[in-house]
Structure formats: structure tokens, C-alpha cells
Amino acid sequence: MSFIAYLNGVPPSAWTIQNPDNLFTWEERNNITGSDGNPTLAAYVNNSNYLGYGEQDYLTTDMYDLTNLTNGVLNFDLAKTQYSATESDILYVSISTDCGDSFALVYGLHGLALSTIPNYNTTNNWTPQTANEWRTEQIDLSSYVGEQIIIRFQNLNSYGNSTYIDNVFIDGILATNDFDVSELSIYPNPTSREFTINLGNTAHNNINIVNSLGQQLKQYDSSVFNNNSQANFDVNGIKIPKKLLIK
Ligand SMILES: [Ca+2]
């Protein structure tokens, strides 16, 4: 079962941007070819026009509760090129467990290790042209299970080239006594419209679909299962985030 926060380009309202020099920083960029090959709205830093070195720009998430997870993985999609070996930006990811007072580094790459294409790219304002110019980064959060965490993305510029991130979410296993997670399956997950829940031999529950802020988008009574172990759902017509949280 997935525990999903999300970002489709636009930071949710509780996310914050810190831009100490008041110059370039994290912004939205629309109609970018996304990690699934379709147009997406991605969070972007225009490092190719950002004439400066060592300037730091922070994109900081809302707080996420990992107390009911038995493991956790932070996923995000990255599209990134570097201008040259010397004009090469850095991306850091850090985690706070004290409401943002302090952060511990969990990810930091620069140079071609950060780039999502093989070579340097001097195209001004580079944009990904195909899905395979994106890479999904995965960061193990198991040591943060039981905590409430804030995630911080930090762009450290070096007059390099574009940095895009999209589809930030936490994937994990819910620890709950309400049902046997190993019995339950949801597919496809994540989904944008239709999905099937198979309860196996577990008791029938009401199904709540909520977004990452915990707001309920739709509720189904357990009668939707009609005494079968499996039911199909169609969430077409409700305003949903790019990825769903089903619990
Ligand atoms: Ca800045």
C-alpha cells in the first residue's frame, strides 16, 4: 500500500520557497515533457541564466507523518543537465524531524552524476524532450519511520543548466491492525482514474480517497464490494492529485 504525498510541478500551498538572494529560484514551468512522456508542470530552477556561484534556493515540503509506516521511500523524478565540468550545479535533499529547526542530508549529487543525460549540455534553458531524459530518484526513509518529517530540496547553483523535479511522493507500507496489508492489493497504483481493490480475506472496509493534505476527495461505503473480495472504482470527474492516497 502506498502512502503518497505528491507534487505535480506546483508546490502544495503548505510548501515554502526560500530565495535568499531574491534572484532566480524554484518556479513552475508548464508543458514540459514529463517522466511519463506527457506534458507536465514541473518545479524548475533556471540555472543556465543564473549567473552566480554557490547561491542556495530551498523548496521545503509540508510535514509528513511516518508514524504508521513500517518502511518508507522518498521518490522524485529528476531531469537535469550540466553545462560543463566547472559550471555544474548541485542538488541536495535533507530531512528534518524537529519542525524544520535542523536538517540532515540524505542526498547530494553534482556533475554528471546528477545529470540525467550522459554528457554536458550547453543548450540554454534546457528542457527534457523525452521521458527517458528523466530519472526517478529513490531515498530510503526507513530510519525516519515513527517520525514526522519535513523534506527540503536545495539547489546550489554554479551557472550550470536546468534542474527540474516532479512527482515527489513517499511510498511505504502502512502498519495497521485494521487489516492484513499482505492480503490487500490495489492496482494500478498510482492511478489517474480507474483502479481495483482486492481485499483478499480481510474484512470489508469503507474506502476513503484523500489527497496528501488529508482532505477527503471521495468515500465509498463497504457495500461497494457487494460481498465480493474485489471492487472496481472510477474516480473520473473528481479533482484528484496526480497520485492518489488510498486508505
Ligand atoms: Ca536564488
Image: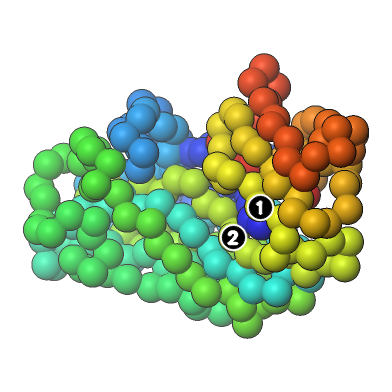
The percent coordinates of residue 229 (x first, y second) are 77, 45
Which structural element holds mark 1? strand
The residue under the point 54% across, 63% down is 74
Task: Confirm or deny contact between disc 2 and disc 1 (CB under 8 A).
Answer: no
Seen in the image, is 15 located left or right of residue 224?
Answer: left
Q: Amino acid at mark 1?
A: Ser
Residue with the mark numbered 1: 185
Measure the C-alpha gap from mark 2 to mark 1: 15 Å
Image quarter of the N terminus: bottom right
Q: Quadrant of residue 41?
A: top left
The residue under the point 58% across, 44% down is 187
Q: Quadrant of residue 191?
A: top right
Residue 208 visible to the viewer? no
Which structural element holds mark 2? strand
The percent coordinates of residue 56 (x first, y second) are 42, 61
The residue under the point 23% across, 38% down is 130
The residue under the point 74% across, 54% down is 200
- The response on whether ligand 1 sits within 8 Å of label 2 is no
Q: Which mark, residue 171?
A: 2
Q: Nearer the viewer, residue 42 or 172?
A: 172
Q: Amino acid at mark 2?
A: Asp
Seen in the image, is 53 located left or right of residue 201?
Answer: left
Q: Nearer the viewer, residue 154 or 10?
A: 10
The percent coordinates of residue 231 (x first, y second) are 73, 35
The image's colour scheme reads: rainbow
The percent coordinates of residue 148 (x first, y second) are 75, 69
Of marks 2 and 1, which one's residue comes earlier in the chain? Answer: 2
In the rendered view, tell whether residue 154 sits above or below residue 44: below
In the rendered view, tell whether residue 108 sits above or below residue 30: below
